Amino acid sequence: MADAVEQLIEELAKLPGIGRKTASRLTFHLLKQSKDTAYALSQAIRQVKDRIVFCETCGNIAEGPRCAICRDPRRDDATICVVEEPSDIHVIERSGHYRGRYHVLHGRLSPLDGVGPEALTVDGLLGRAREDMVQEVILATNPDVEGEATALYLRRALGPVGVKVTRLARGIPMGGSLEFLDEVTVGEALSARREL
Amino acid sequence: MADAVEQLIEELAKLPGIGRKTASRLTFHLLKQSKDTAYALSQAIRQVKDRIVFCETCGNIAEGPRCAICRDPRRDDATICVVEEPSDIHVIERSGHYRGRYHVLHGRLSPLDGVGPEALTVDGLLGRAREDMVQEVILATNPDVEGEATALYLRRALGPVGVKVTRLARGIPMGGSLEFLDEVTVGEALSARREL
């Protein structure tokens, strides 16, 4: 195949969840599109790298040194919600139930992959949690093995700081079916049941 | 979310098989990559549009007016293999069983979507098939409803040209399981059975 085609297939195949077959399909799709469409995608990739950095304070994506949430004076300084990735912030914001600040770990503990606390933004979090106005740290890491381990580690590290540490409630997700839920979730949903 | 991020999600979501969720995942992945990695992808997309055109003769992808296969004097001028898309050429080439020329239709007949013969490169094919050296046209359209309809249309259109028209054999694919094969394929595999 032509070099330029081979090259694009190779670059696309580096993306997560995209194998060589999908990369090849996408390449031939782009070949059929107008120049403008393909250029727009090429340009959008450049711009995201040129314009977006990570917020100095919380690690969220930002177009300047501090992100839109850290710059917003109406947000509540008393709570910090800790997430693994910037994309998790978007999920929590969409719920409309949180008005505090965030802290992005940029990963989770994973000893097998060599990811220890020093590879995450744990020091920054401890520093922020020590500030007087902070009263609660909400741990919103993912509910899987690594996320749980990260949450347990953070709870212990935050112990001496003397701040309240909470985590997201476990339970049955909306639209979920009992039949397909694991026993841990059902167990936690039972023990945390609420009066109707 | 930041404009640049929103923009990239939107552009990625235009690609076939990529919804907003995947687009968002890919965007955050690119945000975490080095500038070089992201620039390489951006550049590869531009280059494919800047360098690659479709071959004047057969419609395959090419880096000049004629593609590598049309320029190759060792290929057999007596046969033309007709495929729907340039990517199909790659599949046939990989088999190593074909040394003739190709012709890319750039689509297939689909009256419901308003795709008639004039939207395909049928005229070009008829012109090429009329040349003295051409003895056989192999129809390698996809074995689905539209591909079959396109093959039947082409066989009729090629009738007056007086060239031999063949199509790829039907049968049981390697690694396939009889249990999951449709009855048409099994029927054709039976009637075209060969002595061992």
Image: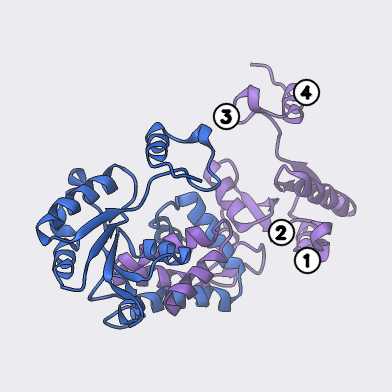
Chain colours: A purple, B blue
Instruction: Name the residue type under label 4.
Output: Ser
SS type, badge 1:
helix
A43 and A14: which is toward the camera: A14
Residue underneath mark 1: A119
Q: Quadrant of the N terminus of chain A?
A: bottom left
Image side of residue B17 versus residue A101, left or right? left
Residue B131 in sight here: yes
SS type, badge 3:
loop
Q: CA distance from mark 1 to mark 3?
A: 35 Å
Counting residues from the start of the chain, the first of labels 2 and 4 encountered is 2
Instruction: Name the residue type under label 2.
Output: Gly
Could you say where residue B33 lies in the image, as x and y percent from the top left?
61, 70
Q: Are marks 2 and 4 in contact (CB under 8 Å)?
A: no
Counting residues from the start of the chain, the first of labels 4 and 3 encountered is 3
SS type, badge 2:
loop
Counting residues from the start of the chain, the first of labels 1 and 4 encountered is 1
Could you say where residue B107 lies in the image, as x and y percent from the top left?
26, 57
Residue underneath mark 2: A107
Residue underneath mark 4: A191
Residue occupying the point 54% across, 38% down? B177
B89 and A166: which is toward the camera: B89
Q: CA distance from mark 4 to mark 3?
A: 18 Å
Residue underneath mark 3: A174
Could you say where residue B3 lies in the image, as x and y percent from the top left?
44, 63
B192 and B24: which is toward the camera: B192
Using a 10 Å C-alpha cutoff, classify the residue at mark 1 as few (fewer than 14 neighbours), some (14 to 19) or many (20 or more). Answer: some
